[in-house]
Amino acid sequence: MNPILVHVTRGNAIESVHCGALAIVDAEGAIVAQLGDIERPIFPRSAVKALQALPLVASGAADSLGLTDDELALACASHNGEELHAQTAAQMLAKAGLTVDALECGAHWPYLDTATRALAAQGREPTALNNNCSGKHAGFLCLACALHGGPNLRQYVRGYIQPEHPVMREVTSALQASTGYDLANTPRGTDGCSIPTYAIPLRHLAHAFARVGTGIGLSADHARAAQRLRGAAAKAPFMVAGTGRFDTRVMERLGERVFCKVGAEGVFCAALPDAGLGVAIKIDDGNNARAAEVAMAAVIESFVALDDDEAQLMRSLSDASMRNWNGIEVGRLVAAPVLRGLPP
Amino acid sequence: MNPILVHVTRGNAIESVHCGALAIVDAEGAIVAQLGDIERPIFPRSAVKALQALPLVASGAADSLGLTDDELALACASHNGEELHAQTAAQMLAKAGLTVDALECGAHWPYLDTATRALAAQGREPTALNNNCSGKHAGFLCLACALHGGPNLRQYVRGYIQPEHPVMREVTSALQASTGYDLANTPRGTDGCSIPTYAIPLRHLAHAFARVGTGIGLSADHARAAQRLRGAAAKAPFMVAGTGRFDTRVMERLGERVFCKVGAEGVFCAALPDAGLGVAIKIDDGNNARAAEVAMAAVIESFVALDDDEAQLMRSLSDASMRNWNGIEVGRLVAAPVLRGLPP
């Protein structure tokens, strides 16, 4: 069993716990810290969107279509489906000469409650642009422009979510190159947005993010692409997640010192470029918001040089207040002691 | 560590797991089945609303105010905040001569997404009537009528959520009597709706529900109250939860053969009157919808005599399909083998 990474307290008792595993690895692949089983392949889900976006830049598509920082950040995002996210995804599609109906991610109501209620108040329904993955998918369709280069793009991209489609092959190839893991012989599942997700050990995921943060061990094209994507996320952190979200709040404050990305089912990956490290976390029970995020906040506290304000923000995320409907503090989400004892 | 009770699969791999503990106990307190640690006190949260509603009936308040089955079921509910739930809570308050401003549970948007969007579309905001606990609180205020019996009820009930208020003392006393657990010397927390929650071992919670299902071991007043509340829930299962919810779906199909009630943080209790058993489950990580419910469904399959249609419903809940935004089955929620091997 993996160790407890997060305690959920109520009153003066522990009410619930979240177990998980954690790998912190440098760009050469050396393990700097580990908790639990970091060799078991796990589905990284949306935590690897930046790896999946490498070909968008490396192919030249981002340049030839003139994608902005906002748009590149959105290509790495699991966003809230807010108006600005949806508009930005639509812009990306327009640059590719496509429209919302090319998206194959499916539609869902915005993650952000107030955005959902705003849509409902206007009598509107969500579209695929509101899907938290719409930016990633729009990025895939922009990549398709570079791969195809001919007429009938609309026909070419049909079925781009399938593993054997040229677009998805290119995406998978970047995932394999950056993680150094054999994706042909590992379990494959279908993600929430219908693209394939490949099981990869935390050690390899952390290694990939150390590479993304440093460029070391990536091809020159991928290294440049990684730097560009990290820069875009630092300049447009709202696009990576949105109002109130962990990734946005942390990157707004810490800029290029942290590139972090949550994934479904309790996965969280980050590049810490100053330390030359990559981080990968999986919570066994799949909880993101109150487990993977709390654990990642504690890791950032240990491995990133922070000023007092920054340290206060991170502590508010690694030892967070839980309030009830009357605003009374009823408990806390607390990173377990094992996360406080990590090197350095 | 407690055993894995539920597997979450994706493709042909296990993506996440939920650990927990389970007690099945008869009305004499004999343990019929157990998994994990059933002696550690856990906060039962809303799973014990029926125990907290015993004084509402036992005091004579339910009769003197003419509470209906709908209203008594709502007093045991964690409801969706749908229009009908809110209206029924308002009716209960009206019978007590009170209005929504007497509720001290706080307001929140309805649990049911479509109910939230319907409110938003009408330009409305939620009130305390939409709080999932509004029926329980309205029940407390009805109980207050019997305890107080004088003028100035509005003043008498102020602060009824505090542990030392006469209303809450009566509620706590019923909880102590039915569980047989010393609540004065156990951790106490504040619940989402601001009333106290007392930590109680699963063994005692299961015992309490065996008593609720059989009347054995309860005072005559509490035994009659338990029967009345179970009957009300069986006649008005929509009121206990609402559209699409586990408790409602199961009690709609199985009637008085199961009285089940979910609580926050992965707690689930049930009375199985035909077998004379009580059940109590706690998922370590606090997950209800995809863990406690899946485990409870497997228990019901093992311990309740079901016809083919009923068995099919329960199997669809203990081995449930998970679909993505395009409606593709991407994985399943599956009760672990350990839950299939329980007696009888």
Image: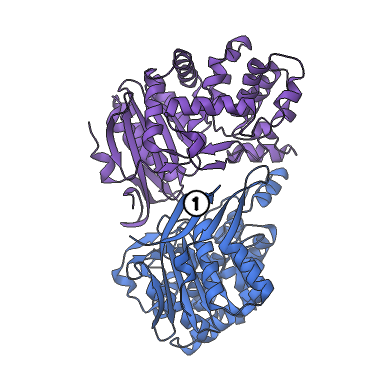
Chain colours: A blue, B purple
On the image, the x and y values in percent for residue A323 come to 63, 48
**On the picture, is B17 further left or further right than B112?**
left
Dot 1: within a 10 Å radius of its alpha carbon, few (fewer than 14), some, or many (20 or more) residues?
Answer: some
On the image, the x and y values in percent for residue A141 come to 54, 69
Say above or below: A14 vs B82: below
Reading the image, the residue beneath label 1 is B325
Say above or below: B290 vs A283: above
Q: Secondary structure at mark 1?
A: loop
Q: Total number of numbered labels? A: 1
Q: Identify the residue shown where x is 53% and y is 62%.
A: A294
On the image, the x and y values in percent for residue A153 come to 53, 69
User: Which one is in front, A37 or B80?
Assistant: A37
Judge whether residue B335 can be spotted in this image. yes
Residue at the far front in the pictured view = B185
User: Which one is in front, A188 or B300?
Assistant: B300
Say above or below: A335 vs A325: below
Q: Quadrant of residue B294?
A: top left
Q: Quadrant of residue A175?
A: bottom left
Amino acid type for the residue under numbered disc 1: Trp
Q: Identify the residue shown where x is 61% and y is 79%.
A: A256
Q: Chain of mark 1?
A: B
Q: Identify the residue shown where x is 45% and y is 86%.
A: A218
Q: Indicate the quadrant containing the N terminus of chain A: top left, top right, bottom left or bottom right.
A: bottom left
Judge whether residue A152 can be spotted in this image. no
User: Which one is in front, A277 or B220?
Assistant: B220
